[in-house]
Image (cartoon, rainbow, N blue to C red):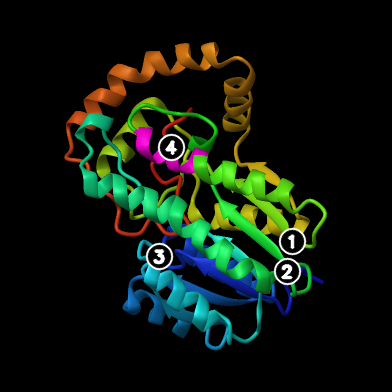
Amino acid sequence: MSRLAGRGVVLTGATGGIGAALCARLVAAGATVHAIGRDPQRLAALAAAFPGRVLPLVADLSDAADVRRACSLLADARPAPSILLLGAAVSAFGLFEDLDEATLAAMVSTNLLAPMRLVRALLPRLARAPDPTVVAIGSTFGSIGVPGFAAYSATKFGLRGLIEALAREHADGPVRFQYLSPRATRTPLNPPAVDALNAELGTAVDDPDTVAALLVSAIERGDRRRQIGGPEKLFARLNGVLPALVDQALAKQLPTVRRHARAIRPVAAPEAAADPSIQEVLP
């Protein structure tokens, strides 16, 4: 029997490429999903596809007041949530000096501040639930800073640090903290410039359902950390122990990254929901 059977799961970014696939996989495993997103129509379509098993909650997680409202509504949600799955994120591909203030603020607010606020608000309630779990969907870019994604990498490094620190801060408590990192994923939110960059660099790109299946398996196993993709896992480890080697590898890609980055005007994705790695370019 699945560890997820009968569980209530709060999923942020539920209408994104991986988010929608996660909804289907979680429901198949027996969970009920309290699906958070900004688009009422897309949330309604998800709920209609899984009647009674995907429960929509419209909220803009970049707004502190909306986060408080969502947490207040979740206090009465049934089944009571015992898993918080942090998947909402926004990203922008482009050179750092080309990113405007609004884009930077959106990434920090959605990718880092929103998870902080949600965990802080929901943690006392989660701790009273059976087998309580906080899962952050991270990114390879949370372990490796990559040109063209400097601000996004910064927020994902922050998210990884948050989950790692909380896991240690609550090591003697009931709540499990998991940081799970997809690699590049094929979704409609992928801007053409990133698709072109991935193609030119020969980047391995996964489909959303494959990623969702791997994430759900990791949640069921209780993996504390998981990097999807063998080459990405190796690259992340190298960056931790021999960063100069990674410097050299990425320096060779720099002209290609700059060419693709300068061909577009960077715009933050409106909701890279549960799909924070959609623009990853690592080999």
Where does label 2 land, which residue? 127
Please name the residue shown 82% across and 72% down the image: 1
Marks 4 and 1, how far apart at CA = 26 Å
Q: Earlier in the sequence, mark 4 or mark 3?
A: 3
Relative image position of residue 71 (x, y in whole percent): 51, 75
Q: What's the residue type where badge 3 is placed?
A: Leu
Q: Residues within 10 Å of mark 2 (few under 14, many from 20)?
A: some
Q: Earlier in the sequence, mark 4 or mark 1?
A: 4
Q: Earlier in the sequence, mark 1 or mark 2?
A: 2
Relative image position of residue 251 (x, y in whole percent): 39, 14
**Secondary structure under badge 1?**
loop
Q: How many numbered tags mark residues here?
A: 4
- Residue 155 among those drawn in magenta: yes
Marks 4 and 2, how far apart at CA = 29 Å
Left or right placement of residue 171 versus residue 149 in this view: right
Verify CB contact (< 8 Å) between mark 4 and mark 3: no
The boundaries of the magenta stretch are 149-157
Where does label 4 land, which residue? 154
Left or right placement of residue 49 versus residue 258 in this view: right
Label annotation for residue 175? 1
Marks 4 and 3, how far apart at CA = 19 Å
Residue 102, relative to residue 66: is it above or below? above
Left or right placement of residue 126 versus residue 275 in this view: right
- Residue 95 appears anywhere in the view: no
Residue 232, relative to residue 181: is it above or below? above
In the image, 123 versus 42, the foreground residue is: 123
Where does label 3 land, which residue? 61
Q: Earlier in the sequence, mark 3 or mark 1?
A: 3
Verify CB contact (< 8 Å) between mark 1 and mark 2: yes
